[in-house]
Amino acid sequence: MEPIVNRVAQSGIQVLDLAEVLGDPAVAVVDLVPFLYGGMILREKHFRDEVAAHDWHAYAGKHVGIVCTEDTIIPTWAYMLIASRLEGVAASVTVGNEVAVRREHTQRALARYDWSRHEDAIVVVKGCGTGSVPDSAFVQAMNRLQGMARKIMFGEPCSSVPLWRRPKS
C-alpha cells in the first residue's frame, strides 16, 4: 500500500486566515447621555464633573466607541474630552457604535499586516469559520493581495474557489 501524500501541503499554497489577522477585539461603547444634565442637555460644568467622577478603568484594553443615543446637540469638544480620559486606558477610541469600532479596528489591523509575505504566491483566503470577519475585510484583503499574489482563491486549500490570477505578461 502506498503512503498517503498530502499534496496540498506540498503545493506551496499560502493560507490567509483573516480571523487570525484581526483577532477578536474587546469592544465597549460609551454613551454620553449619563453625562448630560437631565440626560438631554450638555452643560459644561456638569458634564466635566460627571466625566471626572466616572470610572474609566472599566474600559482598560478595550476598543471604545463614543456615541450619544439621545437626539441632542453635542459639541465636538465633548467627544475629545472623553477621548482624553481614555488615553492610556483603552486600546483605541473612535466616535461611533460597535459596528464602527469593529470597522476601524479591521482597517488598522489590515494596514499593519505584512502583505509582502504573499509576494508572487498562490493564496487561499480562508473562508470557513469567518463569522467574526466582516465582508469588508475580505474585499480589502483582495485589493491588497492583487498587488502581490500570483493567484487568489477563497475557501480551503483542498476545495477553493478561484477568484483572480495575475495576467501573464
Image (tube, grey):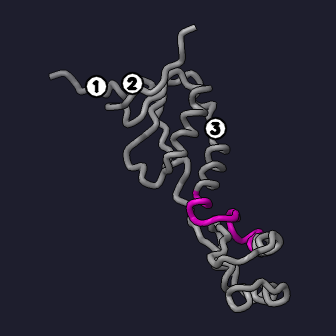
Q: Amino acid at mark 2?
A: Gln
Mark 3 and mark 1 lie on one chain; the one further toward the N terminus is 1
Mark 3 lies on residue:
114
Q: Quadrant of the N terminus?
A: top left
Identify the amino acid type marked 1: Val
Task: Select label 3 or label 1 by which is in front.
Answer: 3
- 92 shown above or below 58: above
Q: Locate residue 91: give its quadrant.
A: bottom right
In-image side of 161 versus 168 (left or right): left
Q: Amino acid at mark 3?
A: Asp
Q: Which residue is mark 1?
A: 5
Rendered position, 64 above or below 120: below
Q: Residue at x 62, y 76 (%)?
A: 69
Q: How many marks?
A: 3
Q: Residue at x 53, y 14 (%)?
A: 167
Residue 104 sits in which quadrant?
Answer: bottom right
Residues tagged 1 and 2 counted as in contact (Cβ below 8 A): yes
Q: Is residue 55 above or below residue 12?
A: below
Q: Which residue is mark 2?
A: 10
- Residue at the far left in the pictured view: 1
Q: Nearer the viewer, mark 2 or mark 3?
A: 3
What separation in Å lies between label 1 and label 2 (alpha carbons)? 9 Å
